[in-house]
Image (tube, rainbow, N blue to C red):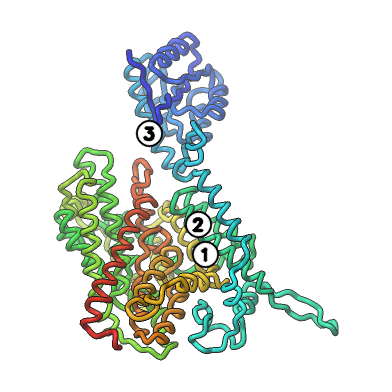
Amino acid sequence: MEEQIIANGNNEKIKVLLVDDEDRFRENLAKQLEHRGYEVLDASNGEDAIKIVRHENPQVVILDQKMPDMDGIQTLKEIKKLRPEVQVIMHTGHGSIESARVTGKFDVFSYLEKPCALDDLIREITAASQERVYAMARNEIPDVQRTSLKNWLVGVQNARPGVIILGVIIFLTMVFIPAPKQMINFLSAKKTGNLTESIAGYAEYRKMEKGQTIVEYYGKKANLYTQTKNWDGAMVKTAPGVDRVAFRAKVMIGVLMVAALFWATGAVPIGITALLVGVLMYFFGIFPPSMVAKAYAKDSVIFIFGVLAFAAAISKTGLDRRIGILLLGTSTSLRKFALIFAPLLAVTASFLSEHALVAFIAPILMLVYMGTIRTANITKDKGLIVMLLLMLTFCANIGGPGSPAAGGRNAVMLGIFGDYGISISFGQWVKMGLPFVPVMAITIAAYFLIVFRNKVKVKSVNVAAAVKREGEKIGKMTPDEYKAAGVLILVIILWVTFSSKVGMGGPVILCLVLLNVLGILRWKDINSIHWDVVALYAAASAMGVGLASTGAALWLANSFISILPDSLTSGIGLCMSTSFITGILTNFMSDGATVAAVGPITVPMATLSGTSPLMVGLATAFASSFAHMLIIGTPNNAIVYSIARDPETGEQLVTMKDFFIHGSAVFLLSMAVLWIWVFFGYWKWMGIGSM
């Protein structure tokens, strides 16, 4: 009979551990399995089996339930503690329904009576080896193949040694190269109060005193001042030298480069990279420990945590299905979902919290996806889930230009306008920005319809019908749904009316407490959210604070601008270059921090070059919505990434690679539509260049 060559797509034999105290039975079965192409290990008792599992790491264990001393159940428990991904087939001559029930409590893959047909056993081994792949994904265990140096260096998701080594080299290079002269000049320049000076783009420029340098301001903030004795014995505080601050600025740029590399490639788990950011900020003295912790705990981070937990509560009650029926009722096909729902969502995101919209809709689309593949009798449709969820988050992202209410980045730009004596009303902003939003949403929809036309397996997807079916499964509304709906309305009211005072995180945390008091949300529900995504966004926030405070963000922004040709430093060219620089930076920093770093540089450039500062400022603000490429770019991306996980296998359905590939394409499309439709289009027709 033909040998079974099996396994995880790499032509390696499945390694099977056979545990049985009957020597003759064990030896005969081992020979039969070896003849079929398996690598077989064997043990006559539980103690030896555990040692083999520790050192040999078999993929499947065939375990006898009734053995002397340490029986099969005890052995099973110890194996699962050591290696939760190992699949165990319980094999015993003392089988019963009760035995199956008991062993089922301990994560047994299957239960077979001994003796059983060899083909039946092989069928179970093959299925168990595939289930091990899913178990490794659920438990975040990398499966690095060491068949060659190249394979080891490339690695797998969450374990890429080659990328890790590259990251270390990049970081050390960035840290130890001499500080650029331009950086030294920025850090040592004194504030004069003239808004056109070179350091006006420093994120905390408004907090600096006249005559103060970034070195002095940051040194005081980060507690880098040293105590020294004066000539008369008095203790005085001495500001750090410019080299000390420049060193920290270089460290932060190195942290940015390494974190972006690791997050983009999946070199290590995203939560570990998030911790690494903090570790480097601690040990290189970017801030005192309490300030590093504070940088991690920004309002936007609390908001993401709260929204993920709130979405879990909404899903638990079934209210998400009701919301889905309202929002997706017209999406009777993928085409209608793309061309009708997408622009409606984008326009809505211009006036309401796009993060909240994504948090409520993404779980609904996951329900639609899971129901669709079950109906089609397939295990996965990668094209469908990527199309549904990335279209959702990208369309929510580009709602930003639509109105001043669409995010803190716009508030930052309004503040910069105020510093330069420029005023713009809510209506003027909407007039200049809202026409971009539906056109861009339709462009995104067209991109996905074209690119995924042959990648989606299920061609006829009726989103509205799928949501309706999910709603019908749960019957009429329950008291818990009414309670959850009331809390949802409350949080929206608080966001709309009080977010300027209490932030976006405060209201959602309050509502989590209310949901617990009402008996809807338990702590274990909160504990089940994807904390790695919360950690990731916290690290991105902390990194943004470090880049801004050390002056690194200012240097990066100026470096981009300094290499521009003269044709891109005035008029429409300045709008184009400004938007491109902002768009690139906002994928690595928060949108507000990006606008704070770039806006004060480019707005005065516009004045000096005779270009409308309003145009350049809005170009900066609009492009800060184009954070499509990385999951750290915006809470929308982080929320979608956290939700896009198969509930049965634990597989990450939408990966960081998907974000980078399709996000890069949508980023370029966003730039093209902004330049062609806005700068050379309706802005010219409206005569905005003369404003």
Q: Is residue 176 above or below residue 679?
A: above
Q: Do callouts 2 and 1 mark residues in contact (Cβ within 8 Å)?
A: yes
The residues bearing labels 3 and 2 have C-alpha atoms spaced at a distance of 32 Å
* Extreme residue in the bottom direction: 421
Q: In front: mark 3 or mark 2? A: 2
Residue at image mark 3: 131
Amino acid at dot 1: Met
The residues bearing labels 3 and 1 have C-alpha atoms spaced at a distance of 38 Å
Q: Secondary structure at mark 3?
A: helix
Q: Secondary structure at mark 2?
A: helix
Which mark sits nearer the N-terminus, 2 or 1? 2
Which mark sits nearer the N-terminus, 3 or 1? 3
Q: Secondary structure at mark 1?
A: helix
The quarter of the picture where the C terminus appears is bottom left
Q: Residues within 10 Å of mark 1 (few under 14, many from 20)?
A: many
Residue at image mark 1: 543
Looking at this view, is 378 or 549 the one in front? 549
Across and down, in percent, residue 289 comes to: 62, 65
Residue at (39%, 28%) from the top-left corner?
7
Residue at image mark 2: 259
